[in-house]
Each structure stands twice: as C-alpha cells, then as structure tokens.
Image: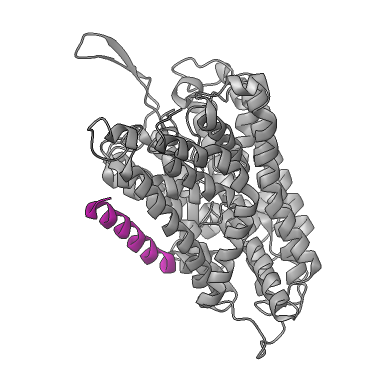
Amino acid sequence: MTLNGWIQILIYCGILLLLVKPLGGYMYRVFNGERTFLSPVLVPVERALYRVAGTNEREEQHWSTYAAALLLFNLAGFLVLYVLPRVQGVLPYNPAGMPAITPDLAFNTAASFITNTNWQNYGGESTMSYFVQMAGLTVQNFASAATGIAIAIALIRGFARASGKSIGNFWVDLIRCTLYLLLPLCIVLTLVYVWLGMPQTLGAYVDATTLEGAKQTIAVGPVASQIAIKMLGTNGGGFFNANAAHPFENPNAISNLIQMLTIFALGAALTNVFGRMVGNQRQGWAILASMGVLFIAGVVVCYWAEAAGNPLVHALGIDGGNMEGKETRFGIAASALFAVITTAASCGAVNAMHDSFTALGGMIPLINMQLGEVIIGGVGAGLYGILMFIVVAVFVAGLMVGRTPEYLGKKIEAKEVKMAMLAILCLPLAMLVFTAITVVLPSGVAAMGNGGPHGFSEVLYAYTSVAANNGSAFAGLNGNTPWYNITLAIGMLMGRFLVIIPALAIAGSLAAKKTVPASAGTFPTDGMLFVGLLVGVIIIVGGLTFFPALAVGPIVEHLAMIHGQTF
C-alpha cells in the first residue's frame, strides 16, 4: 500500500460526502413535488406524461396497488426486452449485422436488465445491435433505476407518515425520478464522457490497419450515453465485453473517478432524503455512517490484499503487488477501490477482472454482495435493503431491554419482522441453493475456468452476483449455457422481487400506524451506539449464513496459496 493510493481513496470519500447533502436536498424536493430550477421546463412534460399514464400527482395508492403497478410495468419491460434481441436481425441501426440471440440468452438478458442486475452472458459489441443497446438496454437502465428509487421513497413514506392508507403513486414517482433526476444528470455526464474520449456515434465499426499490417475492426457506437446511466443507475452492464476496463468505456483516471462517484452518488444521497422526510437528518447520517463503516473495512482489506500480492510471485524475486487483470492506467489502489464500490453498490461494472484478484481481495466483493448490497447498495435498493436490517436490529434491541421495538416512533411488530426476514433470507436461498446444485452437475462444472476452490468461487460469485442484483462476474466462468442462463435469470428475479414485495408491505403497514412519542426508555437510533448495533447485526447475519461457503472457496484458496499451491 502506498501514500498515493490512500490519498486517492480519501479524495474519493471526501468528494462523495460533499455531494450527499445538496443532492439529497434536490431529490427531497423532487419527490415532495416542490418546485426546482428545472420545473419551468419540465412541469408541462410531467403533466403530459401523467395524462398518458391516466393518473395525476394527487392520486395516491395503497401499497398493494403500488406493488401491482410496479410489477405490471416490469413485466411489460421484460417482454419488450425479450423480443428485441430475438428479432434484432431485421431491426434498423445494426451496421455490424448482428443476428438474433438464442431464447435462453434472451430470457437471461431480459431478466437481467429489468432487475437492475445487468449480468451479461455475452459480449456487447459482438452480440447486440445499436438499436437493442439504445431502445432495449439503455431504456431499461433508466426504468430499473427509477423503479428502485421509487420503492425506497415509498418505504420512507411508510416510516414518515402516520395513520395513512397510501404510500404514494408509483407512476408519479417513476416519472419524477426519470424526468427530474436521471435524465438531466445523464445528459451532463454524456457530454463530459464524450469530452473525455468516449465514442457516441451511430456510424459503422471502424476497420483499421495495425503497425504490423494486420486488419482490425474497432467497435464503436452510442457508448457515452449508455455508460452515463449504467453508472448513475448502478446498472453496470457494459457496451463492451471488457466493461469499464475498456478504454472506450473508461478512458483515463478522470473518467474512472467520475464513474466511481456516480455509482455511489444517488445511493448515498438517499440516506439524506430519508433523514429529511422523517424530519431528522441525523437518522440519515446514522444510516450512512453504518454503510461507511462496512465500506471502509472492505476497502482496507481489498487494497491490502492486492498490494501484498502473491507470495509465490515474490519468491521468484518479483516485487510489488498483484497487477494481474488490472489496467496500468488505474493501478492497484484505484482497481481495488473500484471493485469494492461496484460490489458495495449493486452496480457490477468492473475496471479490473475480479477473477485475477488474490483470494482475499476477491473475497471482499463476494462479501459485499452477500451482505445484501446494503453498503450504499443499488439506487434505492441499498436504502430499502438496509432498512430491512434496521427492522431486525431494533427488534433485537427491544428484546435486550424487554420492551416493544420502536423505530422513528413506529412500533415494530410481528408482521414487519416477518416481512423483513423474508426479504433478507430470499437472497441466501438463491445464492447458496443454486451454487450447491451447480457444482455437482457435469454441465455446471464444465463451465468453470479453474478447478479447486477458485472454480467453486467462480460459481458462488455468479449466483451471489445475480441474486444481489449486482451483475459483476469473476470473469472465469462461461455462463452462456442453457443451465446458467435460466438459473441465473431465476436468481435475479428472486433477488429483486422477493425483496421488493415485503418492503412495500412493510411500508403499507407502517404508514397505517400512529406515531408514538419518544420516552425515557426509547432506544436512540441516530447515534453511534445504534450504528454499532446495526453493523453488528448485518455482520452476524451475513457471517452465520455465508461463512461455510466462503471457507471452502476463497479462504481455503488463500491458505493453499500460503503453502505454495495455486488454482
């Protein structure tokens, strides 16, 4: 580890913290329907969209109606995204003549992009036409991100309201999020990315002659606009197969910093929105502090492991950290930081190949996802994910002091705890059960790029990534087979919708409850004691659930490496 590396990490954290309050304040005004500097231009468009949707900003929905609207919207997106790549051969804007993809890959891709996972069992530049990239994938990047934020806002209303029957209007939240937040920021980001060197064109791929005289086809396309929403919406799916390690997706250190900031920006700001909407910003800062403790711990371990490198390589007289699978223009510090950020958020973009990380360095991204993507998390998903753990944490605190659990003046009762546990436990169900089945199937084992514990880690990482709606991969697994395409898609759907429905049910239940005034026995939830309790609950639940799987994967691989064996 170097001083330069730590300075990079500290600069990143400092800029991120400076963005939280202003961005959170703007989002608060947007979702409260207050006037913003964009209102003169966008209010007429907003009202026109309400007319098309058959609703208005004053019409609110019961939690079950909100959930039904959300599910129908996502079902429509799934069907459209399944059909588009199946018929892309006859669609326009296909200069490379991309043919239709197989049914199982189309199923996987549709499930991937509507769930904000963006797992890709294909190379974007060699599989998807410009039309599908724009009308299919990029559109769903906006839709899935807006859906996640809408759920978080609905759940916040559940905590903030008293004796209410509604939690907002899904169509209003969706439209406001897209119109006032995602689109304006992405327009600015796209222009910045083009300035930094990303392609943005509908022209054909470029044929070039190399210095050796060979012919090479250089893929281009509408890249910058997709990368803008891919990072801001924590989607992660790349235009190119190499993702953010590709120079056209991530040209230099400045673009790398901007991409890391945009991955965390909205998720971090939503904690401030939470504090504002419940009337106590300290509550939001306490949640962000809990996320920050877990994030910093992950960065320290991952950076240390990659900077230490492989002792077997050092024995050959080669000094330095582990640069395998990393871009020299980013180095170890920025690569380790990016890996922790992208897996702490449910983003999945990568600027280095996690398959080439050391065993412990690669374990941190795994753990980030297995904890439920609550360390900032995906846009919206991180906040409603950690609120599930908050319900459990205050329940544990209530048991410790012998009184009914409360949070923000709301009694946390059996229904809320049951729904929270359902949301938390559905993730290990998808991650561990599918992994266990796959590693004993010949077709599952045949897709592994490595044997031994590293091969097991590849499979565990894949199912962990999809269930956590992350989408990053170890890069050593060939997932484009019928078994992987179908089971990974099922994992994505479980990880998204088996969390969303309980979260909305909790929102509806809490919104209907009266607020109880704080008393001398009320457990304070805006201080460091609560931060410690919440972090402890998250680590204990994650440890008890996943330690056995980690022990036979990255942990035993690390021990084997120390004793001179690699896989």
Could you say which quadrant of the image residue 58 lies in? bottom right
- Magenta region, main secondary structure: helix
**Magenta segment: does it hold 361?**
no
Colour style of the rendered protein structure? one colour
How far across and down, in percent of the image, does residue 208 sit? 27, 15
Please identify the residue farthest to the bottom as the structure is shown: 520
**Magenta segment: does it hold 15?**
yes
Please identify the residue farthest to the left as the structure is shown: 211
Q: Is residue 485 left or right of residue 293?
A: right
Count up the numbered dots: 0
How far across and down, in percent of the image, does residue 560 sit? 46, 35
208 above or below 32? Answer: above
Q: Residue at x 53, y 60 (%)?
A: 43
Q: Residue at x 51, y 17 (%)?
A: 98
> 103 or 305: which is nearer to us?
305
Q: Residue at x 22, y 32 (%)?
A: 317
> 216 or 558: which is nearer to us?
558
Report whether residue 39 is seen: no
Report whether residue 344 is seen: yes
Segment tinted magenta in the rendering? 1-22
230 above or below 436? Answer: below
Please identify the residue farthest to the front as the structure is shown: 563
> 441 or 163: which is nearer to us?
441
58 above or below 137? Answer: below
Could you say which quadrant of the image residue 466 lies in? top right
How far across and down, in percent of the image, does residue 373 sit? 56, 52
How far across and down, in percent of the image, does residue 549 sit? 61, 42
> 46 or 461: which is nearer to us?
461
